[in-house]
């Protein structure tokens, strides 16, 4: 009997929450956390906790809206006016093109570091095509099993790497006391903002639907699923910070920017603890990068299919608005093949600027729209926000707005 036909929720620790968290934690987030550890030791550990709380609040809001109304998050955004589509349409198209290249390059770099017989670009292309094959059918049960494997791989490798550094538990715990070292504001925002996702947070409601959790009776299991997922993510990111603090901060070692920083860190591990540890860490890096790739190939494609269906004014639940429709497959192709050009020719300057600006605005967009939607009659009264949730969402909005301003400024500075 399928989950959709049962009278009671199917309880499962591994669910859409772990999928959204695993998809959101990519190489860029690992770098931000590692750099924070290398610069400030454990002083910013508290920001990891804050980041997890913020993501729990945002993902819970998206999930609560979906379960309480039966609508998708994009249908909720569309109810606020056409301006949401004016922003979201260009964003998801440009984001997909640039992210596709970045995801394949990151995964390719991890595989090249392990198996240098092929180039980064070739490994990236292979990764993109493998991602396409894994999600093309739209079968959520298979997709969830694949993500679970990669989550276990990345979690185990990073925790082992952290354990090998023999961290001082007293110093680790001291990092839970909020302090703001001089010049650390951007690092704090990057660590807190990078714990588990951007646009993929909004995909949570679509994965709930694919799982078969579609009504308010799944509200409690959804919340537990979400909390467990970000607990696992928090431990993983803390382990990353420990590696950065113990290996880099204490020895005053600098690592490269972008995905190359993860390779540099693997080399530090190899020189300190042997080649096995270096290779193990690279496998964890690859698992984090590839889980993000296939998560986006599935989740954001579901969002695009819903957006395309809304633009075509197709009714709620229409097959073309889901994983069996043409738009879902078209967006997977968009993520996979056009971005391959960027692996060889580099990144177009103004496209990267648009990507940076539109992407920076997404998290404030999500928190503001959730505040709006979840406090109005778009949601049954019993499932609307309480005072604490509103305060937390407001704090999320302020934090992500500050990070957005910095990201927009950085994007403009890189271009000009």
Image (cartoon, rainbow, N blue to C red):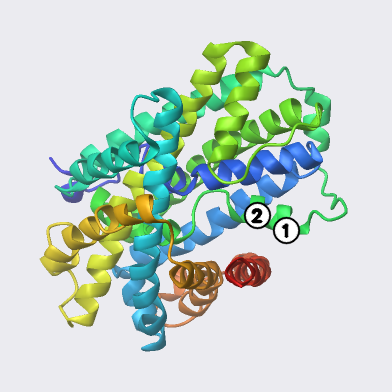
Q: Residue 131: which quarter of the image?
A: top left
Q: Residues within 10 Å of mark 2 (few under 14, many from 20)?
A: many
Residue 19 seen in this snapshot: no
Direction from residue 256 to residue 41 in the image, left or right = right
Q: Quadrant of the N terminus?
A: top left
Which residue is label 2 attached to? 190
Q: Secondary structure at mark 2?
A: helix
Q: Residue 45: which quarter of the image?
A: top right
Residue 51 screen position, x and y as percent = 63, 52
Q: Secondary structure at mark 1?
A: helix
Give residue 186's mark. 1
Q: Residue at x 60, y 71 (%)?
A: 408
Q: Residues within 10 Å of mark 1 (few under 14, many from 20)?
A: some
Direction from residue 82 to residue 161 in the image, left or right = right
Residue 146 screen position, x and y as percent = 29, 34
Residue placed most toward the observer, 169 or 64: 169
Residue 123 screen position, x and y as percent = 33, 36
Residue 123 seen in this snapshot: yes
Q: Residue at x 31, y 68 (%)?
A: 72
- The answer to whether mark 1 and mark 2 are in CB contact below 8 A is yes
Q: Residue 203: which quarter of the image?
A: bottom left
Residue at the extreme right of the image, as rendered: 182
Residue 70 screen position, x and y as percent = 28, 67
For residue 78, above or below residue 147:
below
For residue 231, above or below residue 390:
above
Q: Residue at x 12, y 62 (%)?
A: 325
Give residue 173's mark. none
Q: Residue at x 50, y 40 (%)?
A: 228
For residue 31, above or below residue 330:
above
């Amino acid at each position: 009997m399928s989950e959709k036909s049962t009278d009671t929720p199917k309880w499962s620790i591994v669910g859409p929450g772990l999928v959204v968290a695993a998809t959101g934690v990519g190489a860029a987030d690992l770098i931000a956390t590692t750099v924070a550890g290398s610069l400030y030791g454990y002083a910013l550990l508290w920001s990891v906790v804050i980041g997890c709380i913020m993501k729990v609040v945002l993902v819970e809001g998206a999930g609560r809206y979906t379960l309480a109304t039966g609508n998708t998050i994009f249908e909720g955004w569309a109810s606020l006016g056409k301006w949401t589509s004016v922003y979201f349409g260009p964003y998801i198209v440009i984001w997909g093109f640039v992210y596709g290249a970045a995801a394949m390059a990151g995964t390719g770099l991890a595989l090249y570091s392990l198996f240098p017989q092929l180039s980064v670009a070739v490994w990236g292309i292979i990764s993109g095509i493998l991602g396409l094959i894994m999600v093309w059918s739209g079968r959520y049960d298979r997709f969830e099993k694949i993500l679970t494997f990669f989550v276990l791989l990345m979690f185990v490798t990073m925790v082992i790497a952290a354990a090998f550094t023999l961290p001082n538990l007293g110093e680790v715990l001291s990092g839970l006391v909020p302090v703001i070292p001089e010049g650390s504001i951007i690092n704090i925002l990057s660590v807190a903002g990078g714990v588990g996702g951007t646009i993929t947070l909004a995909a949570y409601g679509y994965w709930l639907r694919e799982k078969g959790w579609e009504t308010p009776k799944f509200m409690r299991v959804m919340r537990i699923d979400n909390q467990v997922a970000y607990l696992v993510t928090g431990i993983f990111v803390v382990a990353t910070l420990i590696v950065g603090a113990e290996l880099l901060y204490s020895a005053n070692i600098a690592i490269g920017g972008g995905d190359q920083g993860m390779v540099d860190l693997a080399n530090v591990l190899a020189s300190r603890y042997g080649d096995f540890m270096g290779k193990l860490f690279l496998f964890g890096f690859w698992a984090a990068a590839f889980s993000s790739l296939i998560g986006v190939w599935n989740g954001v494609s579901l969002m695009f299919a819903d957006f395309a269906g809304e633009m075509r004014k197709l009714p709620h639940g229409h097959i073309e608005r889901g994983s069996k429709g043409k738009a879902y497959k078209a967006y997977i192709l968009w993520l996979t093949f056009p971005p391959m050009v960027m692996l060889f020719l580099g990144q177009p300057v103004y496209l990267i600027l648009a990507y940076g600006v539109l992407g920076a605005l997404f998290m404030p967009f999500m928190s503001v729209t959730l505040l709006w939607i979840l406090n109005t009659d778009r949601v049954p009264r019993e499932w609307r926000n309480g005072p604490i949730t509103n305060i937390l969402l407001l704090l999320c909005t302020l934090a992500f707005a500050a990070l957005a301003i910095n990201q927009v400024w950085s994007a403009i500075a890189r271009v000009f």
